[in-house]
Amino acid sequence: MVTSTSRWYALGALALSTLAIGLDTTILSVALPTLSRDLHASTGDLQWFTNAYLLVLAATLLPAGMLGDRFGRKKLLLGALIVFGAASAACAWSATSGQLIAARAVLGLGAAVLMPLSGAVLTVLFDDRERSKALSVWLTASALGIPLGPLLGGWLLDHFWWGSVFLINVPLVAVALVAVAFWVPESHGDRGRRFDPLGVVLSAAGLVALTYGIIEAGERGWGDARSLITVVAGVVLLVIFVLTQRDRKRRQPLVDLALFRSRAFTGGAVLATVASFGMLGLLFALPQFFSIAGGEDAFGSGLRLLPVIGGLLIGARVAEKAAARIGARPVIAAGLALMTAAMAFGSFTTVSSGYGFVAAWITVAGIGLGCTLPPSMDAALGALTAERSGVGNGLLQAMRQVGGAIGVAVLGTVLNGAYRDDLPAGAPAAARESAAVATRLGDPVLAGAARHAFTHGMDVSLLVAAAVAATGAVLALVLLPRRAGVAPVEDDRLVLAESGL
């Protein structure tokens, strides 16, 4: 029997696992120069250290949710934690680039199971009254890993060898393993659900192609033919996947598309994706700004990101209370409006702007994110029955993952394009490729121009992110039901009271 106290212990275990995933998102970035030197890694190898993880993650999110529903979420969570911990150790002791790429791919497999199933367990452990608070804790733990990654990574690299940035996961995983074993109850979804091999192949191939194409577009630009062909191929495969999922007479599909007949699930999933677009796009640009314009190291950049997390904590707390009184729709719309205002204000940042100015607008952006992401997730998860929470959460996490990848690629492309356009016409090719390189070429005039050009590029990308957030604020009023708290239905058609279907 799950007691009130043990539920929160279980939440702590799940939060530790998501913290490890959040750390892994950013901690690798500070180790790349060292890996390049010690493993003799090429630029392509460095890209694959990240891409191997992301592509396996994208490919396995949906089947992981389905398998958890069928075979037991606790079993798969324990297995995923063991895989994640072992892969972290394998990363630490890799002797070649190929070994590290393989270990990172296995790490992505563990993360792909942990992400949807830990969220699915929350819907079983906590009722409507407590779920919003639990989600805030869970999401904050994941978000904390983003600024803590450079902080911990920088400190570890200063005192230990590069493998320590991966070994930091192992104690977190060990504690989470014990806590999950003792306090997380076993739960299932639809145990009679058949395996859908065609759906698995199509969804995996489509998500991998789309994610890889977006990553490549972020590196090569959206005019690159290979990147565009890969993105289009991913979209085509996902369209075919959707069409096959609609054919429910011959077999049970991997994803029940009737989930999207719920305004709460559809609205929550779309708006959580919009928030992820803005958040990861913002966190992509800011560390570079602190480094290039302010001369900060990884540790200093991580410290300067903490106002985002502080704002998120404040926003999540406010949103929890406000949503209980007035519903999620106005709270989410207000959160996206705050993100819009903060990023529009942030577009006035200059090289000479003091940190106080930057801290102010990123704090407001964090508050807006806290008012958007937890209640959006809560609205989507609240529309799921316990039987569908695994596959539904997998779908939700897949949408957020792709939204984040699109955010980094689109905003990164906008930033890089504006940076190059603002550089002096005679700038060297190396300077046009990287502002960080331009500041180290020994030419103070070029370095100053690169700082100004990079800041201009960041400002333009912030305006694009503000436009996306503003669109999300409008969508919140259109897509979400008047009150969040809509009870999930018990059949596959999701005939919700608020939808009238």
Image: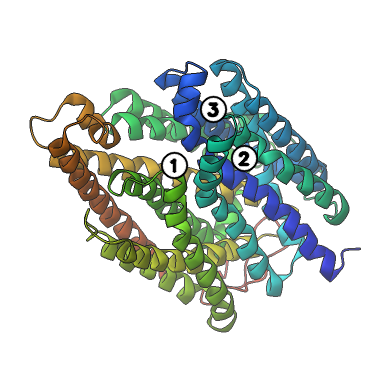
Q: Amino acid at mark 2?
A: Leu
Q: Residues within 10 Å of mark 1 (few under 14, many from 20)?
A: many
Figure check: 434 above or below 255 = above
Verify CB contact (< 8 Å) between mark 2 and mark 3: no
Which residue reaches farthest right?
1
Q: Amino acid at mark 1?
A: Ala
Choose top left, top right, bottom left or bottom right for residue 336: bottom left
Q: Please indicate, yes or no, whether residue 151 appears anywhere in the rendered image.
A: yes
Quadrant (top left/top right/bottom left/bottom right) for the N terminus: bottom right
Could you tell me residue 353's position as x and y percent? 24, 60
Q: Which residue is mark 3?
A: 52
Q: Which mark is residue 61?
A: 2
The label nearer to you, 2 versus 3, is 3
Residue at figure coordinates x 62%, y 40% from the top left: 61
Residue at figure coordinates x 74%, y 59% from the top left: 11
Q: Earlier in the sequence, mark 3 or mark 1?
A: 3
Q: Residues within 10 Å of mark 2 (few under 14, many from 20)?
A: many
Q: Please indicate, yes or no, whether residue 336 appears anywhere in the rendered image.
A: no
Residue at figure coordinates x 75%, y 54% from the top left: 13
Verify CB contact (< 8 Å) between mark 2 and mark 1: no
Q: Earlier in the sequence, mark 2 or mark 3?
A: 3
Q: Secondary structure at mark 1?
A: helix
Q: Earlier in the sequence, mark 2 or mark 1?
A: 2
The label nearer to you, 2 versus 1, is 1
Figure check: 78 above or below 89 = below
Q: Amino acid at mark 3?
A: Ala
Q: Which residue is mark 1?
A: 405
Which residue reaches farthest front?
159
